[in-house]
Image (tube, rainbow, N blue to C red):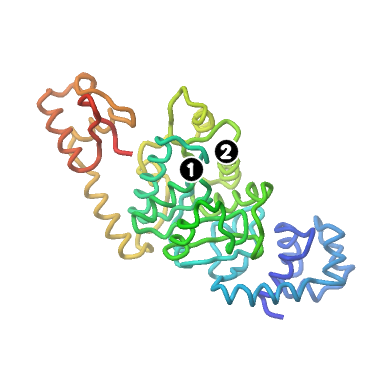
Amino acid sequence: MNNIKAWLTLHLTPNLGALGCKRLVEFFGGPVEVFKAKKADLSRVPGVKKGAIDILANRPPFEAAEKEIVRAEKLGIRILCLDGDEYPSLLRAIYAPPVVLYARGRLDALQAPCTAIVGSRAATSYGMKVARQMAADLTFRGVQVVSGMALGIDTAAHAGSLESGGATIAVLGCGVDVVYPRQNAQLYNRIMGQGLIVSEYPLGTRPEGFRFPARNRIISGMAQGVLVVEAAQKSGSLITARMALEEGREVFAVPGRVDSFKSTGTHKLLQDGAKLVHSVDDILEEYVFDAALLPQSSREKLSLKQEESVGTAEEKTLLDILDAYPQDVDSIIRKSGLPAAKVNETLLLLEIKGRIERQSGHKFSLKT
């Protein structure tokens, strides 16, 4: 029996689960060795359900595993096992990593550092705009964007990454061969061609509500940090953020309108210590990764972005004053303490550089 078949057989065994699989493999020293063990020995492994042990001892789903391998090969889907070289190292380190990961698309997307972007399905136009721009900026800086391909913030994040030439990663709560939600069929195809679609669920698995919280641990587990853009007080995005904290990952949040219930969750995260994010620089300064390991195109973009971000002292002053909400020039002049002529000149330069946006009524805001 080969390694992939052994892992898949364990994965497809009812009542076992990811943690049970991991405990068995660690106890016996490998997935193949599990199937050499007698029932009495299997029963010695703590935390493994009796029902699963009975199946492993008497009727392991070998045939189902073989069919799954054949089907995956026909669809061009790779099966990554927990002990494999291509399996994401950060994900392997979480408490209950998926022992098998189905991957469809470009596997090289797993090589770059990742940030997860999550948020409300019923997002506002502000939230969609912020998520899209944050994803594009992270991609431009060589950081891969991970999300769940749900409607709203997830969709905006994937789209922003793709538009910036990135290989975004979508983690599904169903089989990788199932398009969900159906409205994202076009996005699914774009990600499959330009990025990567992953799931722990067997091929053909339909989306069900209980699968998505489990899916969220993969989103946070693959990333060095999680950025929450618009989330209500009770939402899946906050579950993802909590999982990230439990695994020692960074948690970031974008502030929203104080009178919007769709920002109550993100504001609670900020109160609890999440880092407030104005730009991707707030995220990247918390990361430690070797830029030399990035693809050449990403290193060139990173170098260019760093040169562009230096700016003059006046530019830095105005960027610190401005935020996502428009401010009139008189207010900017008053807060900056700079001469009116210098403020107007600097605003024009920042607008040309694409750092700020001119709004109606001669007002300005940060470009998000």
Q: Nearer the viewer, mark 1 or mark 2?
A: 1
Q: CA distance from mark 1 to mark 2?
A: 15 Å
Tell me the quarter of the image containing the C terminus. Answer: top left
**Compared with residue 343, is residue 42 higher up or lower down, i.e. above or below?**
below
Spot occupied by residue 36 in the image (x, y as percentages of width and height): 80, 76
For this view, does 236 lie left or right of residue 129? right
Spot occupied by residue 58 in the image (x, y as percentages of width and height): 87, 72
Q: Quadrant of residue 59?
A: bottom right
Spot occupied by residue 136 in the image (x, y as percentages of width and height): 36, 50
Residue 77's disc is none
Residue beneath label 1, please?
A: 152
Q: In the current view of this chain or complex, which residue is farthest to the left? A: 341
Q: Residues within 10 Å of mark 1 (few under 14, many from 20)?
A: many
Spot occupied by residue 11 in the image (x, y as percentages of width and height): 71, 65
Q: Amino acid at mark 2?
A: Leu
**Compared with residue 308, is residue 123 higher up or lower down, i.e. above or below?**
above
Q: In the current view of this chain or complex, which residue is farthest to the front? A: 183
Secondary structure category for the residue under label 1? loop
Q: Quadrant of residue 318?
A: top left
Q: Amino acid at mark 1?
A: Gly
For this view, does 296 lie left or right of residue 39? left
Along the line of sight, which residue is nearer the eye, 3 or 286?
A: 3
Secondary structure category for the residue under label 2? helix
Q: Residues within 10 Å of mark 2 (few under 14, many from 20)?
A: many
Dot 1 or dot 2, earlier in sequence: 1
Q: What residue sits 39% from the left and 56% below the top?
A: 162
Residue beneath label 2, please?
A: 238
Q: Could you tell me how many numbered marks the image carries?
A: 2
Q: What residue sits 57% from the left and 54% below the top?
A: 180
Q: What residue sits 42% from the left and 45% below the top?
A: 286
